[in-house]
Image (cartoon, grey):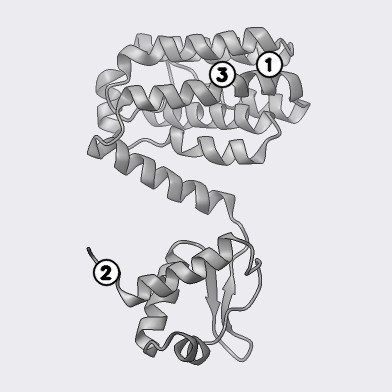
Amino acid sequence: MTVAPAYQVLAERIRVDIVSGQLRPGERLPTEPQLCEQSGLSRSTVREALRLLSSQHLIVTTRGVNGGSFVAEPDAFALGASLADGVGLLLTSGAVTGEDFLEVRRMLEVPAAGLAAARREPRHLEELEAAMFDPERDDLQRRIEAHAAFHLAVAAATGNSLLALVVRPLYSVANREAVSRVSPQPFWRTVDRDHRDLLGAIEAQDVARAMELARAHIDNIRPAERVPVVV
């Protein structure tokens, strides 16, 4: 049985206190000398634990008279980026297959489309309109960015902030060259058509139609889903 390094044990103890709410956002952690005394660990080990927590966006450390380590305020963007990195590693390692990826997308995107149709506001329609792309004239980077923006806008239109965070990793690209190889021009025309049809259903607040179109979109892109593509 492998024993975790002391700094990881300390970091995990503090992490549990943070995620359980025992330590609240903005709350100051004990000082390094205090942590050394409480844990019986050296100052270098305590600092390593704090560095680990900082890299996980759980604490922030400031210098000066009023400095110290504080529990970080929740940052949806940073959390989403961390989740995206993890999903990307799972995909590239083969631990998660393309079919696994599509199953999760279907479980999230289909009901999300229905909620977006029911709850959308004018600002959400503006965000969806802004995420349209031209499959004939726009380059690959623009298409990929617009695609991600569209699906994130659908998630935002649900009014569920947790859903908007959870879906973010599904629209990260690990290998743009591979995306280019498996997604020829006709494929992007299909994506563009699907997005425009879904926008129309959301605008009309047609819940059943929006869910039907979201489900069909996943079926339409399955043949091309041989790499970590976000379309």
The amino acid pointed to by label 1 is Ile
- Where is residue 14 shown, x and y percent of the image? 51, 71
| Label 2 environment density (alpha carbons within 10 Å; few <14, some 14–19, many ≥20) | few
Q: Position of residue 229 (x, y in %)?
A: 35, 27
Question: Which residue in the rendered view is the most extreme toward the front?
Answer: 1
Please report whichever mark, 3 or 2, sits nearer to the chain's N-terminal start: 2
Q: Is residue 189 visible?
A: no
**Which is in the foreground here, disc 3 or disc 2?**
2
Identify which amino acid the numbered label 3 is placed on: Val
For the residue carrying disc 1, how many other residues have a C-alpha within 10 Å: few (<14), some (14-19), or many (20+)?
A: many
Q: Which residue is mark 3?
A: 110
The N terminus lies in which quarter of the figure?
bottom left
Q: Is residue 88 above or below residue 205?
A: below
Residue 186 is left or right of residue 212, and the answer is left
* Relative to 102, 226 lies left or right: left
Label 3, secondary structure: give it.
helix
Relative to 61, residue 96 above or below = above
- Residue 155: image quadrant is top right
Q: Residues within 10 Å of mark 3 (few under 14, many from 20)?
A: many
Foreground: disc 2 or disc 1: 2
The residue indicated by pointer 1 is: 202
Q: Residue at x 27, y 36 (%)?
A: 95
Which of the 4 image quarters holds residue 23? Answer: bottom right
* Secondary structure category for the residue under label 2: loop
Asked if the residues shown at circle 3 and circle 1 are in contact, with their CB atoms under 8 angstroms apart, the answer is no
- Depth check, front residue: 39 or 77: 39
Q: Which residue is mark 2?
A: 3
- Using the numbered discs, state the Cα–Cα distance from disc 2 to disc 1 in whole angstroms: 53 Å
Q: Is residue 88 left or right of residue 117?
A: left
Mark 2 is on which residue type?
Answer: Val
